[in-house]
Image: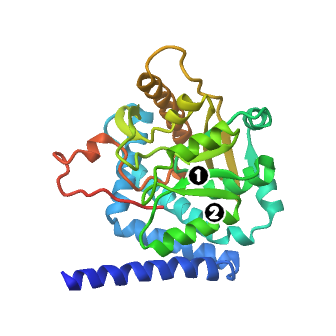
């Protein structure tokens, strides 16, 4: 047991070192070199078919099956899509490490957002109404965060998983704070719900990645024809009356794309639980549409579908965490 503990500690220290070096070294490499390296790493991971790649392909299989309206999915099509998704995921990490040195002008000029959604977002904030932006794990939401701050939203609040080792979590907090975010820990302290409610009631902005249930307190929804669990982000809108705006982000050539969808309103009738469930399903419907348009940019390497979370069906699986 002592040996296993020592190996775990060593692994965590090495992981922490790798992330710290990422922010220090990747910024200094020529972008073309760094992009080549990250693409090669993604391709190696794709060929090795490790556990997370298998989870990614299981998730993408649902997307293809639902879009093609058939249970069977062409293996070559799925493999090609998973390879593109891993390259997209690698690009996310590359840009995250390089974001501190990407000029603000590039972040602003390269971001393509639908005008009506952008207008609705800032109209709510200008009127002093709190806004909850709910996103799936797509594209580069770190770059989108930098864009929304520079666009005029000022600081906003988000919630982060407490990753292991602690040094990795602290590095992400420092990085996100440098972009203008207030970062609350998901676990390891008081529940962030009360603080989030305060920010919304004060007319603030929240940005929450919401397509995965991180605390086993999420909501069951139908997505891609199956039952899935997503975060109960809608509860914040029900509790405060804030505007719930779904957003999808993706890569658009060398640039970035984002679609801010219309507000999901709080239903007039029903219990609080019923309202949260109804809004969560609408949120899942929007996520489904955004993911279907850009499936290669959905970086879901964790289990979200109930069938995959069922220990009776998959007894060997364990819950996984990741950034």
- Quarter of the image containing the N terminus? bottom left
> Any mark on residue 176, and which?
2
Q: Mark 1 = which residue?
A: 158
> Any mark on residue 205, and which?
none
Location of residue 18 in the rendering, given as x and y in whole percent from the top left corner: 50, 80
Q: CA distance from mark 2 to mark 1?
A: 9 Å
Q: Residue at 49% x, 54% y: name it.
A: 299
Circle 1 packing at 10 Å, graded few (<14), some (14-19), many (20+), is many
Instruction: Tell which of 242 and 83 is nearer to you.
Output: 242
Residue 21 sits in quarter: bottom right
Location of residue 146 in the rendering, given as x and y in whole percent from the top left corner: 71, 57
Quick check: marks 2 and 1 in contact, CB under 8 Å? yes
Element on which disc 2 rests: helix
Q: Residue at 80% x, 67% y: name it.
A: 103
Location of residue 178 in the rendering, given as x and y in whole percent from the top left corner: 69, 66
Q: Residue at 66% x, 40% y: name it.
A: 259
Q: Is residue 187 above or below residue 259?
A: below
Regarding residue 30, the answer to whether it shows in the image is: yes
The answer to whether residue 302 is left or right of residue 116 is: left
Q: Is residue 276 above or below residue 47?
A: above
Location of residue 115 in the rendering, given as x and y in whole percent from the top left corner: 78, 36
Instruction: Tell which of 192 and 278 is nearer to you.
Output: 192
Sequence-first disc among 2 and 1: 1
Element on which disc 1 rests: strand
Q: Residue at 76% x, 47% y: name it.
A: 153
């Amino acid at each position: 047991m002592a040996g296993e503990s020592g190996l775990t500690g060593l692994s965590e220290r090495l992981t922490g070192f790798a992330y710290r070096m990422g922010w220090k070294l990747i910024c200094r490499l020529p972008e073309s070199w760094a992009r080549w390296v990250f693409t090669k790493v993604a391709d190696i991971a794709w060929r090795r078919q490790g556990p997370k790649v298998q989870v990614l392909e299981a998730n993408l299989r649902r997307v293809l099956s639902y879009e093609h309206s058939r249970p069977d999915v062409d293996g070559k099509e799925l493999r090609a899509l998973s390879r593109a998704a891993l390259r997209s995921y690698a690009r996310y990490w590359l840009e995250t490490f390089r974001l501190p040195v990407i000029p603000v002008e590039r972040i602003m000029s390269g971001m393509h957002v639908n005008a009506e959604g952008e207008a609705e977002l800032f109209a709510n904030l200008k009127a002093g109404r709190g806004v909850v932006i709910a996103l799936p794990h797509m594209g580069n939401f770190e770059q989108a965060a930098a864009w929304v701050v520079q666009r005029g939203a000022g600081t906003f609040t988000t919630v982060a998983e407490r990753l292991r080792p602690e040094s990795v979590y602290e590095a992400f907090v420092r990085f996100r704070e440098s972009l203008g975010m207030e970062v609350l820990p998901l676990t390891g302290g008081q529940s962030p719900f009360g603080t989030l409610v305060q920010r919304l009631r004060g007319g603030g902005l929240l940005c929450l990645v919401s397509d995965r249930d991180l605390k086993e307190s999420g909501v069951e929804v139908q997505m891609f024809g199956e039952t899935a669990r997503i975060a109960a982000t809608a509860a914040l809108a029900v509790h405060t009356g804030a505007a719930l705006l779904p957003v999808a982000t993706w890569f658009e050539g060398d640039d970035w794309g984002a679609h801010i969808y219309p507000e999901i309103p709080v239903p007039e009738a029903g219990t609080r639980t019923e309202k949260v469930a109804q809004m969560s399903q609408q949120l899942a419907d929007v996520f489904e549409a955004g993911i279907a348009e850009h499936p290669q940019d959905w970086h879901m390497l964790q289990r979200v579908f109930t069938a995959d979370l069922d220990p009776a069906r998959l007894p060997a699986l364990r819950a996984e965490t990741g950034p």
